[in-house]
Structure formats: structure tokens, C-alpha cells
Amino acid sequence: MDIFRSSSILVGLVPMFLHAQPAIDWQVNLGGSNMDIGLRSVITSTGDHLVVGSSRSIDGQVTGQHGQLDIWVALVSSTGSLVWQRCIGGSAFDEGRDLLSTPDGGYLILGETRSNDGDVIASLGNRDMWVIKLSGAGNIEWERTFGGSGDEYAFSIQRMSDGSYMAFGATNSDEIPGYHGPLSDYYLVRIASNGDLIQQRCYGGTLTEDGNDMTVTPEGLIVMCGSASSVDGDVVGNSGQHSIWILAVDDQMNIQWQRILQSNGASQALALCYGPSDQLHVTGYTNSTAGQIMQTWGDNDIWVIALDTLGNVITSASFGGSGRDAPWDIVAANNGDLFCVGLTGSIDGQVTQHQGAEDAWVLSLNASLELNWQRTFGGSNDDEFRSVVVDENGGLLAVGRSNSTDGDLTANLGNIDFWVVKLRSEEVGVPDHITGTALTISTTTDHMVLITGLKDDQHPYALYDAQGRTVAQGVVRATAGQARIALPDVVPALYVLRIADHAAQVLQLPNR
């Protein structure tokens, strides 16, 4: 007999579900027989998806290849069909990094170029930051290169409230204003809506500063993240380690605040976002075992930090297992939840499924940075998600790369493909209606569950994860109306606890 259907006191039907964990709605591999890597996407005004990355293919779905590596832009319909594609570049190496929609229905592509021919009109140095304006149909309307005689790298582009655009990267060109030398600095460029340069500036010290992402708050604060090795110049508070560096400037590029986050190992911020709770959320990797990181899991861990808009740390949490884990993007949903995507090479810790060598990994966190759920995607080879966007229905579109031919993959066009995956939200967890009286439940950081309100007797229980799988079960004895369940081996996440003759309740096991 099902012990959870023998309720003697019915006080109503309570449908109990966890946060919705994603299932694949559709997926598509894009590219040709060589290497094709997707990096970023935007949702168009028609609900389609424009994806940017880089391609070395000259066949398959890739046409118009210019040289050794081109920026590749592909429009994918809302159901996963390829609408059009375009190669952008010259005879050398050109890479797509970011994109955004423009008010006229077109798109702005941010990338890097080493070419001085093809679609590139003016080459400034060895490697330039490159901005390309496309029409809604994918035709080039204008393009501009930025930088100096050295190397420029591109990471992120954002639209400002006055219609101009802010592009973020890194540079080692000594003619850029504010360059500290002799290694790389953060590089910020403001351009007009027609592509003309308005202002540019470098930030850093005499060692290496590597940028990775940027966001703009509703008040116009420009916040950049990456890593710093310097202990001088604009970098304050670093002890000489490879530390996370978060830098905020106003719309005139004046520094407002900066923050170093460091531990006893190497750390780097890879992405950040602004959330509806007026907080900044930064994610990166760390191999530290002490310092500002609260908990370590193994090799490289994912580290998520919440800050206010003055740069004060509110809280942080780490995620992963004993292998290599890395995040590539983080976004905030309207309800305050966060979605973080990247890769995992772990088969333990908080990783409860393993597809192959390295898997694409999606994590959902609540506003307190507690794990709602996590799920891996991929096949037997290396797969990863490089970015994610949330649509108006709460679904996710993840973009990355795959060279698997099995598991979650339904196709492979050769070598490494663009991989575009639409994830839909669906109700999961305990799928039937739960009956009975409610209990008072609390948890401790060592995963001891305290239950109050039970009769002094033995009570069967079961714990379910976000996929409805039984994680733990047994019989607990109540004394003086209280009982304790020890769950030391259960990873921090959201669960449903069901005790016979009592209503099921959502249970959050916190980070240790």
C-alpha cells in the first residue's frame, strides 16, 4: 500500500511542485564540417532568435566564408528552423563576440578582426575591436574598427539611454588614452548611433587586466567585470593575485567605485547582470580554498556574488563538483531568480547527471543564491552553453557549442557545431495532489531537518528532487511533537518533503 495515500485527516488538496526545471522544447545544430561556435543571441521583435559566433566551415549551412575564421550570424525561427545566415570578415581571423537589437529593427554585432580586406575597410593594428551594423535582413549598413597599433579584444556591447553604444573589451595599445602598460587594460569605447567614436578610455595597472562582461543599470552606471593582477594604477585592494575585478564608471567614463574579490587561488569574473531587486550579480570561476569564497567543491568552481549598486557584497555562493566547472553567462528573470549557464566536468557534488566528457550546465538560483535546480545537457563528447536569454513566457534559449552525436543531441554537422537549445518550463517534482495537515519545518546548514507538529509515533517520509526522483526515504520517530531527519549527503537545492498523513512541503537545503 502507498503509505502517502493513507491519510486519515483531509484538509484540502494541495498541488505541490518545485520550481520548473527545463525540458528541451527544440534544438538545432548549425554550421558545416569544420569548427562553428555560437556565443550570444537576442530575441527579435518577431520572436525569432539571432545568434552570433564564429565559423571556420566552408560547407553545410555556411556560405560566403571569407578566410580562415569569420563572424557567423544566423537567424533561427521561433521553432528552430534556419531562416538566413551570413559570414562577415576578411581573409584572416575574425570572431563574433556579442550582439544587440537596434531601434530601427536591425542589429549591432561586436567582434574582433585581424583582417584588412573583405568586409573590413580600415585595419588599425594587429587585432581590432570591430562593430558592424546590420539591417533586419542581415545586410551590412556600416562597420567601424576601434583600437590602436596593438591588440584589442571585444566582450560586450550595450545601448545607452541617449542612443549611443558602449563597447567593452581589453587592449595593449599604448596610444589609447589612460593606458597603463606594458600588458593589457580594460578598454571602454563609446560610439554614436552611426558608428563614430565619441570617447575611449583604459582602466588598469602595470600588470594584466582581462575584461569579460559589462552591464548598464537603469541609472546609467556602467559596470565591468573580469580579473586584475595589478596592485597599482586604478586597481585598489589587490594583493598581487589573479583576482576578480569589478569596476563601475559613469556615462563620462569616470570611475565611481571598484571592488577586488580574492581568495588564496586564481579567480576571474566571466559574466554579470543587473536584477529586478536592484542588485548586481557577478559569476566567474575560482580554484580557491579559502578567503572570500565560503565553500569549495573541487577543481574550478562556479562562484556567484551579489552586490548592491555601490559595490558592497551582499552574499556569495559556489557551485560544482570535484571536476572543472565554469560559468559563461548569468541572467535574471522578472521574479528575481537567476539562470547561470556554462560547463561542468564533474560527476559528483551538486552535479547529479553526467552526459559525457564536459557537459553544458544550467543552474537556477533564487535571490538568496540558493540552488533551485540544476541540469546537464549534452552527449558523450564536450558540450557547453555560452549564453542564455529568458523569453516572455519564462522559457530559456541557450547557445553554445557541441561535438557530440548522442545523448541530448539529435544531429552533428561535423567537428564542432553551433548548438541552439530552446528550453521550456514545465511543472516537475511531486506530480500528484498531496493531502493532510501542514507541519513546521526548518533546516540547518549541516542539513539537519527539524519537523514540529508530529504525533509521538513513527512516521514514514520521502524526499523528492526537482525531477520527482526519490532522494531519501525512511521512517522517523517523533518525541514531544518533534523529529529530526539527517541529510548530510544530499546536495544543497530545493526539494519536496512528504511525511505520511501530512501535506508535502517545499524544503530548501542551504549551502553548507
Image (cartoon, rainbow, N blue to C red):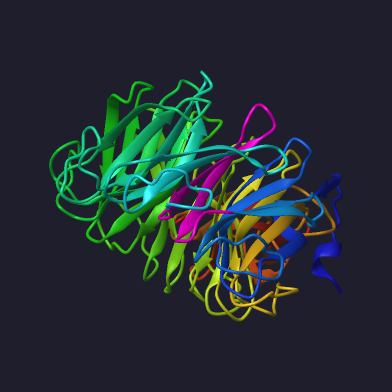
In the picture shown, does residue 319 fall above or below 47? below
- What x and y, as percent, mark residue 251? 38, 22
In the picture shown, does residue 184 fall above or below 81? above
**Who's the residue at 50% across and 60% down the image?**
448
Q: Is residue 359 left or right of residue 247?
A: right
**Who's the residue at 40% across and 53% down the image?**
284
**Quadrant where the image shows the C terminus:** bottom left
Report the front residue among 411 and 95. Answer: 95
**Quadrant where the image shows the N terminus:** bottom right
- What x and y, as percent, mark residue 381? 58, 79
In the picture shown, does residue 198 fall above or below 211? above
- Number of numbered discs visible in the structure rendering: 0
Q: Is residue 497 magenta?
A: no
Picture quadrant where residue 21 is located: bottom right
In the picture shown, does residue 327 fall above or below 259? below
Q: Which residues are magenta?
A: 88-115
- What x and y, as percent, mark residue 335? 64, 36
Task: Tell me, yes or no, if residue 453 can be seen here.
Answer: no
Q: Is residue 91 magenta?
A: yes
Report the front residue among 479 and 192. Answer: 192
Picture quadrant where residue 29 is located: bottom right
Task: Tell me, yes or no, if residue 394 can be seen here.
Answer: yes
- What x and y, as percent, mark residue 311? 34, 32
